[in-house]
Amino acid sequence: MKALFIGGTGTISMAITRQLAQNPDWELYLLNRGTRTEELPEGIKTITADINNEAQAAAALEGMTFDCVCDFIAFVPGQLERDYRLFKGKTKQFMFISSASAYQKPLSDYKITESTPLYNPYWEYSRNKIACEEYLMKQYREEGFPITIIRPSHTYDERNVPLGAHGAKGSWQILKRMMEGKPVIIHGDGSSLWTITHNSDFAKAFIGLMGNIHAIGEAYHITTEESVTWNQIYSVIADELGVKLNAYHVPSEFLASVGPYDFNGALLGDKANTVVFDNSKVKRAVPGFTCTVRADQGLRKTVQHMLNTPALQTEDPEFDQWCDRVIAAMEEAKERVKNG
């Protein structure tokens, strides 16, 4: 069978690309701008084009049809409208990467199924994903466009440690603060449950849904069913670094109100909530699917990879200084209350 990935080199899609390269049942094409082709495994065919230039993409895809097309980089309905024009009648399945952050916030039940309402007043990113899903479902119901919707939660790989409150340049600065013995901000009291899924596990279920007759017209989330607290996540990272965790807990609402970062969306609309996922639906569609990378094991491997890869050690002095200011302000407020 023949598949086309729009993107194909990101955190989620690279793991799928690597696993499909070893699968004799699939012939894989990637359509992207060709900026990360050196990381691709052998046997992957590339189509160099900018999907946001519809005329260019249409010319590059002229005469081609696919069993499955997957868009990993669509975020707003207009991009799905473009995909519909490009692939209507040219694919047997169109897969869209949505987001589990689209599920109702605040949650009415901590355990999430695919029937949990989609509603997120905190994060525009999530609202755009919801609008994308609504557009695709309309095309499925009215035009028979063969869609499958996938909702990842916090999926990670060896290039970035999954964390809560971090700056625009990724997670390295927090690891650096830990190694320097500086206090590290953890949102809330750190006891809420979170789900982190290694991209290699995500890829197994995703590939099982490709070309799957039961997946047409359906939505699935793909996550591990292991739950860990934020305190556990940060503690494992510090332990792997060989340092003592100096945790500093700050209410999520406070962080959202004082930061130049979008913590209103990323925390209040996502990570500040306890989430536990029921993966029964995807397991019915993909018999035998199970996650095998335990949270602490995946975290330790990612920390080691970042320590051994200078290119991933991007410092973020602005975020570092912001953390210091937040902690100083919290300490000052404590003293003022104590001393009247």
Image (cartoon, grey):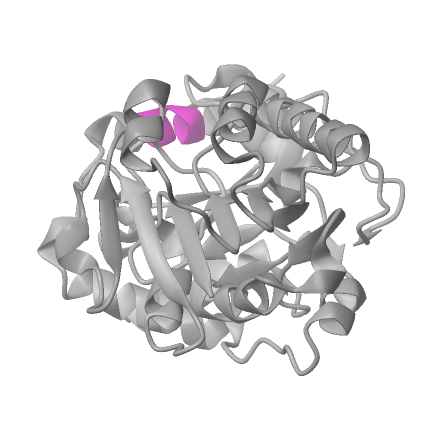
Q: Quadrant of residue 101?
A: top right
* Residue depicted at 64% across the width and 77% down the height: 289
Q: Quadrant of residue 268?
A: top right
Name the outermost residue toward the front: 63
* Residue depicted at 62% across the width and 61% down the height: 223
Residue 307 sits above or below residue 252 on the image: below
State the residue in front, 298 or 138.
138
Residue 290 sits above or below residue 151 on the image: below
Q: Is residue 244 visible to the viewer in this orientation of the structure? A: no
* Residue depicted at 74% across the width and 31% down the height: 143
Magenta segment range? 322-328
Q: Is residue 113 visible to the viewer in this orientation of the structure? A: yes
Q: Is residue 139 left or right of residue 210?
A: right
* Residue 135 position in % (x across, y down): 69, 25
* Residue 50 position in % (x across, y down): 28, 28
Q: Is residue 60 left or right of residue 100?
A: left
Q: Main secondary structure of the magenta part?
A: helix
* Residue depicted at 52% across the width and 76% down the height: 294
State the residue in front, 293 or 164.
293
Q: Is residue 226 left or right of residue 214?
A: left
* Residue 44 position in % (x across, y down): 26, 62
